[in-house]
Image (cartoon, rainbow, N blue to C red):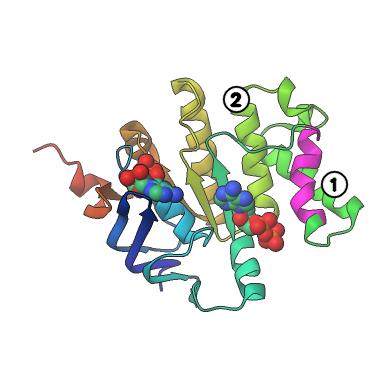
Amino acid sequence: NPILQIHNLSKTYTTRTGEVHALKDVNLNVERGDIFGIIGMSGAGKSSLVRCINLLEKPTGGNVIFDGQDMLTISPAELRTARRSIGMIFQQFNLLMQRTALKNVSFPLEAAGVPKKEASARAAELLETVGLTEWANSYPSQLSGGQKQRVAIARALATEPKMLLCDEATSALDPTTTRSILRLLQDINRKYGITILIITHQMNVIEEICSKVAILADGRVAESGSVRDIFANP
Ligand code: ADP
Ligand code: ADP
C-alpha cells in the first residue's frame, strides 16, 4: 500500500475579501521508496499542500492517509508520532543559530527522550552520513548554504522518518550545490529506502532525481505519472 494517499483534498481560505480555493480535489498516491516530485508555479497551492500533509493546516475537505493512518482522525499523540515519521526539509534550512551542527542534529533526539550521550553519538553518525564530520562543532553562520542543508537533512533523518518532505529544499542554492544535495537525497533513498517527496517550482530538480511527478496548477493536479511519460519529447 502507498505510504501517502491524498483523497479529494481541498483547502479554502476565508479572507476579508472572500474565499481562496488553494487546493481543489487533489488526489495523489506516493508509493513506498519513490522519489516523487510535485511541481507547480507560484500560487499553484504547493505550500498549502505541504501544510495539509503534515497537518500544520487543517484541510477543508478530503483525507490524508500517511502510512495507513488517517491524519485527520488520529489522536493528538498518534499525530505527533506520525509527524516524527515525516522528516521536513525547508528552503531556509530552519536551523537553530545558537547551536552547533551536532547540537542541531541531536536536538530532536533529546526532545524525543534519547539520553544526551546516545543522542550525540547518533548525531555524529548522521553528520558523517551527510559528509560533515569536520563541521560538527561549527555554528550555522560558519557554514555554506549547501552545508546548512546537509545539517538539516541529518536532523531530519535523526528520528528515522519513513518519508522526507522537501519543501523547495534547493531553491536557495546555486546549481552545483543543488546537484550535490539532490545526489545526497538519492543516496539516502537508495541506502535506507526512505520515500522522498519533493515540492518544487524547479523543473531541473524533477528531471534530475524524480521517478514520478504530479503537476499542480491552480490548486488541481493537472497531470501525474512517471517523469518519463509526462515529459517525454516526441
Ligand atoms: P504556492 O506555494 O504554490 O505558491 P500557496 O499554497 O502558497 O501556493 O497558495 C495557493 C493560493 O492560496 C494562493 O492564491 C495564495 O494567495 C492563497 N493562500 C495561501 N495561504 C493563504 C492564507 N493563509 N490565507 C489566504 N490565502 C492563502
Ligand atoms: P513534536 O516534536 O512533538 O513531534 P513539532 O510540532 O515540534 O512536534 O514537530 C512536528 C513536525 O513538524 C516535525 O517533523 C517538524 O519537522 C515539523 N515542523 C515543525 N515546524 C514546522 C514548520 N514551521 N513548518 C512545517 N513543518 C514544521
Vertical position of residue 204 compared to residue 222: above or below: above
Q: Quadrant of residue 125?
A: top right
Q: Quadrant of ligand 2?
A: bottom right
Q: Position of residue 224 (x, y in %)?
A: 24, 54
Q: Position of residue 216 (x, y in %)?
A: 28, 49
The stretch drawn in magenta includes residue 107: yes
Which of the labelled discs sits on residue 145, or is there none? Answer: 2
Decide if residue 98 is on the left or right side of residue 46.
Answer: right
* Residue name at image x 8 percent, y 38 percent: 234
The amino acid beneath tag 1 is Ser
Vertical position of residue 15 compared to residue 184: above or below: below
Circle 2 — which element? helix
Circle 1 — which element? helix
Furthest-left residue in this view = 234
- By secondary structure, the bulk of the magenta-drawn segment is best described as helix
Most foreground residue, 146 or 229: 146
